[in-house]
Image: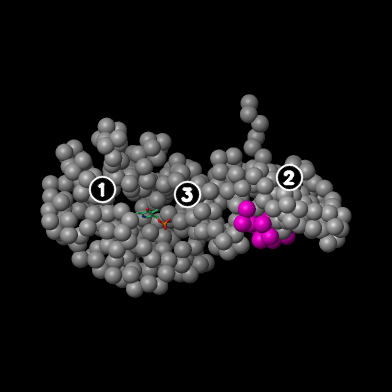
Amino acid sequence: MIPPAPLRLRLDGAALVHNWQWLRDQGGTAACGAAIKADGYGLGAQGVLDRLSAAGCSDFFVATWGEAAALKLPGDARLAVLHGVRDADMAFAVDHAARPVLNSAEQVIRWRGTGRACDVMVDTGMNRLGIAAADIAGGLLDGLAVDTLMSHLACADEDSAMNARQCAALAGLAGSTGARRLSLANSAGICLGPDYAFDLTRPGLALYGGIPRREAEGHIRQVAFPEAEIVQRRRIEPGETIGYGACFTAAAPTEVAILNIGYADGYWRNFFGHGSAGAGRFPVIGRISMDLIAISVDAEPALGEGDWVAIDYALPSAAAASGMAQYELLTGLGQRFERRWD
Ligand SMILES: *Cc1c(COP(=O)(O)O)cnc(C)c1O
């Protein structure tokens, strides 16, 4: 028997489903999928897949075939692998239910001979992944069984003229391939309005409680709640310091709790001077260690060894406090948490 973990990630399954339903409803008649790459943005891809699948989501996206291989797919779930296929993926990929999202002429040529279905990414200005629109006109996709033709927005979280340009570029490709569906919007793209939804949307961040744009404020609920156990409580006197570098000096007698969480768990060093726990009642004081943090618990005389404390981790405010992206705060959540859905 392995002893229970001293830190856990409480996961609110109802909030996850609520967020997916809100995102789906913004897209009008478009289907709403879910990006579950990077282990479901750190929450656990299988747990996310099972819950969203039960709620009616049937299109899921991972980055690599290794991620696809790790998943058990419910009967009606469709999975797409965003990075396409390398030579080294082919033997595995042709026998797997997932579709590659082909991103280049090389990948198209590699896949064409299989006769199997695929998705295709077309670049509309991001210059990251995707074939060029001119390649489509040139016949690159002829003979390919394309399910979804997709593109990706570079600036959806900003009010940029590029959004409308990319939207128009994808709309202009309607009917130019045999694709059954068009897809453009990530979480932020969904917030740009129904014109951006096409046939299928691909949210990630907002499913997990991220607020990509102000339109989502008040609609998206927090899903991931880190909690850590107190290892030790101590009292320090005025002039004494806490932690590495002695960066915090007590001005008055201070009650301190040492918590079982640190930067190795994704509680980044940037939270130094800015983080808090217990809904703001317990400021994080001193530097963040690899496995430990200190909080001031003057506000709670009863807290002691073995008690659990909720780390303040609402993504917009935690991102503002730490200077990290909401994405990084999710995907950095480490392997030592016990992930517990409720
Ligand atoms: C990661 C990803 C998404 C999801 O993006 P969010 O900003 O997390 O909603 C959608 N589409 C593609 C191609 C992606 O790589």
Q: Nearer the viewer, residue 143 or 132?
A: 132
In what quadrant does ligand 1 lie?
bottom left
The disc labelled 3 sits on which kind of residue? Answer: Tyr
Asked which secondary structure carries label 3, the reply is: helix
On screen, residue 302 above or below 211: above
What residue is disc 2 on? 230
Q: Earlier in the sequence, mark 2 or mark 3?
A: 3
**From this viewpoint, is residue 323 visible?**
yes
Q: Which mark is residue 102?
A: 1
Disc 1 under 8 Å from ligand 1? The reply is no
Residue 27, percent across and down? 35, 63
Residue 153, percent across and down? 34, 62
Q: Earlier in the sequence, mark 1 or mark 3?
A: 3
Q: Which mark is residue 41?
A: 3
On screen, residue 121 above or below 193: above
What's drawn in magenta, residue-wise? 269-282
